[in-house]
């Protein structure tokens, strides 16, 4: 009887050792797979991400990497969706929105409808760091920026003005002519006859049609060497928007969210993202152990619940350095780089047909 138990004990010992070795191996595989630092951004972020990557490689923090990358994108005069030369509102005035969020503390700062300042992302960061608030808009945000010596300047040049007039004068070939007519009517009759225009024209329908391509945003998400995550978003919003219109980008939980475990940000039809609180939903999924891609897919699926036409791209990154871009518009992509790479890489975003 005893002889029978002895071999069993040996078997148990070996069993424990094998399990121990497997766990050790898994731990090493996990360490190898976990990236020291990562940065990713939407399709217009290639101009800024190399700077963010450098900051991270030198041990800088995720917040700095995000802010400095986005500042370069905001500076790009050829990007009509962000910062300088961002597409103006109906009245020809550029109004910018931006937000930034730090994962480990869940501190956030945002600004909206800011005129004449080139770097709303930096103003948003100051709102987060220096004020008791999380969100400043319009004149209040501008006043705050002025008080902090941010440079006040024109943020549209001849190129931006020409783009705006092309739409107004019907020279924009990409825009359906009916939509252009609507835009002109809205512009000319905004103050006194807006109510009539809204009754005469299918405003909602036409906005949806022409806005399909006339908008964009930049999202940047970074994970630094300390394992901290940060997300930033900056946009000029929807082209030809009503003055004062604010989309999802500066709204914490809608266009942006970040915890110590995961970050997410959106681009696309801001009104839908706002109504569905997409970024918070996706981050919650990742907090509950969804892989970034699966989490983003659940965000895209939300669109089905309201059955309305719109574009959505969701970018995600988790604390293990795993990222994904998922969208309901084919052909979209994003950029990615990590500690094993010298340069950023273009990656196709996963297309989900709804
Ligand atoms: N989401 C942005 C907004 O609605 C625009 C975009 O990303 O295309 O302001």
Image (tube, rainbow, N blue to C red):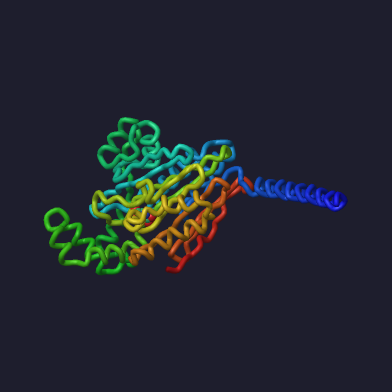
- Report ligand 1 position as a quadrant: bottom left
Residue 140 place in picture, x, y as percent: 26, 37
Residue 37 place in picture, x, y as percent: 58, 43
Judged from this view, the residue extending furthest toward the front is 1
In the image, is 87 to the left or to the right of 331? left
Identify which residue, 14 or 309, lies in the foreground: 14
When asked about the image quadrant of residue 108, the answer is: top left
Quadrant showing the C terminus: bottom left
Identify which residue, 102 or 198, lies in the foreground: 102
In the image, is 257 to the left or to the right of 178? right
Identify the residue shown where x is 30% and y is 50%. Answer: 246
State whether residue 254 is above or below residue 129: below
Say whether residue 86 is visible: no
Residue 109 place in picture, x, y as percent: 38, 39
Say whether residue 39 is visible: yes
Identify which residue, 228 or 178, lies in the foreground: 228
Residue 159 place in picture, x, y as percent: 34, 53
Identify which residue, 316 or 92, lies in the foreground: 316
Identify the residue shown where x is 41% and y is 50%. Answer: 280
State whether residue 278 is above or below residue 182: above
**Number of numbered markers:** 0
């Amino acid at each position: 009887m005893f002889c029978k138990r002895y071999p069993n004990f040996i078997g148990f010992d070996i069993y424990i050792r094998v399990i121990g070795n497997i766990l050790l191996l898994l731990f090493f595989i996990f360490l190898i797979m976990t990236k020291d630092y990562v940065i990713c951004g939407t399709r217009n972020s290639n101009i800024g991400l190399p700077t963010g990557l450098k900051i991270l490689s030198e041990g800088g923090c995720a917040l700095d990497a995000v802010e400095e990358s986005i500042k370069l994108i905001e500076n790009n005069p050829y990007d009509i969706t962000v910062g300088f030369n961002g597409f103006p509102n109906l009245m020809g005035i550029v109004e910018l929105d931006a937000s930034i969020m730090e994962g480990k503390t869940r501190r956030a700062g945002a600004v909206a409808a800011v005129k004449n300042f080139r770097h709303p992302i930096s103003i948003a960061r100051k709102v987060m760091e220096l004020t008791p608030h999380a969100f400043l808009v319009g004149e209040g945000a501008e006043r705050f920026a002025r008080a902090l010596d941010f440079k006040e300047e024109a943020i549209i040049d001849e190129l931006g003005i020409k783009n705006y007039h092309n739409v107004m004068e019907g020279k924009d070939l990409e825009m359906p002519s009916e939509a252009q007519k609507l835009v002109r009517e809205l512009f000319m009759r905004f103050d006194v006859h807006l109510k009539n225009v809204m009754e005469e024209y299918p405003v909602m329908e036409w906005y949806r049609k022409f806005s399909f391509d006339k908008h964009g945003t930049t999202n940047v998400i970074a994970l630094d060497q300390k394992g901290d995550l940060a997300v930033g978003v900056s946009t000029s919003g929807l082209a030809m928007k009503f003055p004062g219109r604010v989309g999802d980008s500066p709204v914490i939980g809608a266009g942006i969210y970040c915890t110590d475990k995961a970050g997410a940000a959106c681009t696309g039809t801001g009104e839908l993202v706002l109504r569905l609180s997409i970024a918070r939903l996706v981050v919650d999924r990742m907090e509950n152990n969804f892989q970034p891609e699966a989490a983003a897919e659940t965000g895209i699926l939300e669109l089905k619940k309201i059955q309305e036409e719109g574009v959505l791209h969701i970018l995600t990154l988790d604390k293990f350095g795993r990222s994904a871009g998922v969208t309901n518009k084919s052909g979209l992509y994003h950029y990615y780089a990590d500690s094993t790479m010298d340069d950023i890489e273009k990656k196709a975003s996963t297309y989900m047909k709804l």
